[in-house]
């Protein structure tokens, strides 16, 4: 496994490359260009500038999160081919710059979703929170407004202003849209880009829907073992892979996260793992929390063991965690708790590796 850390760029992140370089065991960052409109090809010069900036700090840029998918591709509109051509060009340019894995999602309109960005926890820290009963009283518009208010001036990943500007129109275009159509359109997209991925050696890794169930009547199709199975089958190529996010999948208590990791990692389809914990409550609420197994509902040891025992060689990063020690950062993306999480994951990996040598 290769440990990486998400970074939003010198201008937009409260965390610096220098700080990331000092987290033990972190070899590279997970980056993106944030100023290119969804659907447009990423300019080569900007990709290379980011690469050089990252490499000058002693880190690598081998994972992109995300190259977002234009809604016309998700909707299967005629115009999708133009956007798919641009996507292919972006992939080719990224591959030439040394990028190995591209994370993306196929959630209609909205990306990840919570009802609160800074929910107080008993230890005095704050974390992202999902209050099940509150969801029915919200609209996509009210969530966008609340996220703007609560994000302390940071643009949240997946909630970039340009893609939400036309919210009403975009939402209306999904009226009557079905899961089956979304699967078809994902299949069309994957089949169209696989030859480029194979030619240039770049792997696609779809992120689960977060939370892994439909919201605001919008279909969400990346949510459990069966749907992941269907997605890897949409294009039969090792380049058609997954970002397995333990916290997203784990929000549904029916998802056996270690078993899902084990199954798809053994198939060689997990190219990227987001490993974090969440604490579920009986009423359907869940809170984000520290990474330790004892702090939440997921067994991080079993998740790491599933990856280790299936020979996982992909990229892995800690994720979200709490906002601690007075840090002011993008919600879910502070330095401190993600760094603690990284160290914990590295510790689990070392213990599992050394433990299995002894068994052998
Ligand atoms: C949130 C992230 C998501 C993720 C995208 C992948 O913190 O996990 O925004 O990056 O869904 O495309």
Image (cartoon, rainbow, N blue to C red):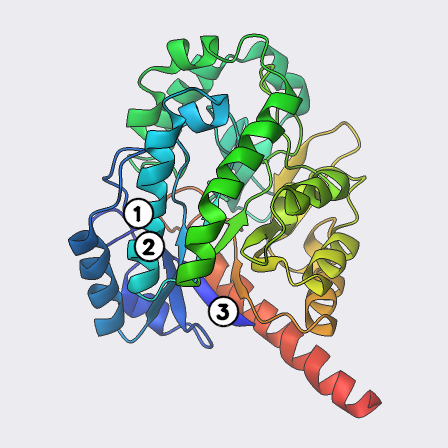
**Residue 157: percent from left, percent from top:** 39, 39
**Up-down: is 348 above or below 297?**
below
Left or right, residue 86 beside residue 195: left
**Residue 127: percent from left, percent from top:** 53, 42
Callout 1 touching callout 2 (CB < 8 Å): yes
Callout 3 touching callout 2 (CB < 8 Å): no
Looking at marks 1 and 3 on the same chain, the residue that comes earlier in the sequence is marked by 3
**Up-down: is 211 above or below 347?**
above
Looking at marks 3 and 2 on the same chain, the residue that comes earlier in the sequence is marked by 3
Which mark is nearer the camera, 3 or 2?
2
Characterize the local packing of mark 1: few (<14), some (14-19) or many (20 or more) Cα atoms within 10 angstroms.
some
Identify the residue at horizontal 71%, vertical 86% (top origin).
354
Residue 92: mark: 2
Secondary structure beneath dot 2 equals helix
Residue that badge 3 annotates: 3
Visible residue check, residue 202: no
Asked if disc 1 is less than 8 Å from ligand 1, the answer is: no
Depth order, front residue of 47/255? 47
Q: Quadrant of residue 274?
A: bottom right
> In the rendered view of the protein, which quadrant contains the C terminus?
bottom right
Distance (Cα) linking label 1 and label 2: 5 Å
Residue that badge 1 annotates: 89
Distance (Cα) linking label 1 and label 3: 27 Å
């Amino acid at each position: 496994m290769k440990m990486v850390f998400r970074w939003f760029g010198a201008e937009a992140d409260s965390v610096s490359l220098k700080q990331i370089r000092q987290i033990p065991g972190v070899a590279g960052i997970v980056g993106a260009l944030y100023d290119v409109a969804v659907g447009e090809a990423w300019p080569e010069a900007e990709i290379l500038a980011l690469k050089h900036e990252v490499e000058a700090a002693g880190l690598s840029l081998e994972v992109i999160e995300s190259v977002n998918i234009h809604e016309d591709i998700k909707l299967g509109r005629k115009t999708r081919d133009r956007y798919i051509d641009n996507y292919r060009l972006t992939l080719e340019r990224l591959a030439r710059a040394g990028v190995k894995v591209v994370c993306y999602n196929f959630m209609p309109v909205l990306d990840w979703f919570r009802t609160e960005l800074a929910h107080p926890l008993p230890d005095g820290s704050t974390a992202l929170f999902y209050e099940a009963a509150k969801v029915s009283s919200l609209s996509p518009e009210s969530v966008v407004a609340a996220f703007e208010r609560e994000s302390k001036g940071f643009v949240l990943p997946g909630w970039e202003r340009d893609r939400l500007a036309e919210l009403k129109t975009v939402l209306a275009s999904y009226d009557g849209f079905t899961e089956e159509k979304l699967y078809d359109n994902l299949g069309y997209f994957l089949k169209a880009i696989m030859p480029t991925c194979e030619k240039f050696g770049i792997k696609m890794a779809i992120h689960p829907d977060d939370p892994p169930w439909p919201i605001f009547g919008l279909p969400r199709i990346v949510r459990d073992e069966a749907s992941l199975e269907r997605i890897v089958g949409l294009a039969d190529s090792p380049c058609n892979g997954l970002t397995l996010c333990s916290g997203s999948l784990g929000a549904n208590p029916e998802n056996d996260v270690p078993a899902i990791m084990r199954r798809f990692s053994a198939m060689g389809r997990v190219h990227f793992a987001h490993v974090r914990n969440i604490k579920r409550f009986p009423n359907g609420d869940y809170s984000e929390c520290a990474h330790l197994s004892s702090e939440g509902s997921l067994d991080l040891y079993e998740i790491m063991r599933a990856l280790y025992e299936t020979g996982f060689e992909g990229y892995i990063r800690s994720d979200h965690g709490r906002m601690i020690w007075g840090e002011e950062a993008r919600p879910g993306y502070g330095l401190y708790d993600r760094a603690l999480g990284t160290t914990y994951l590295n510790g689990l990996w070392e213990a599992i590796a050394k433990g299995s040598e002894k068994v052998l």
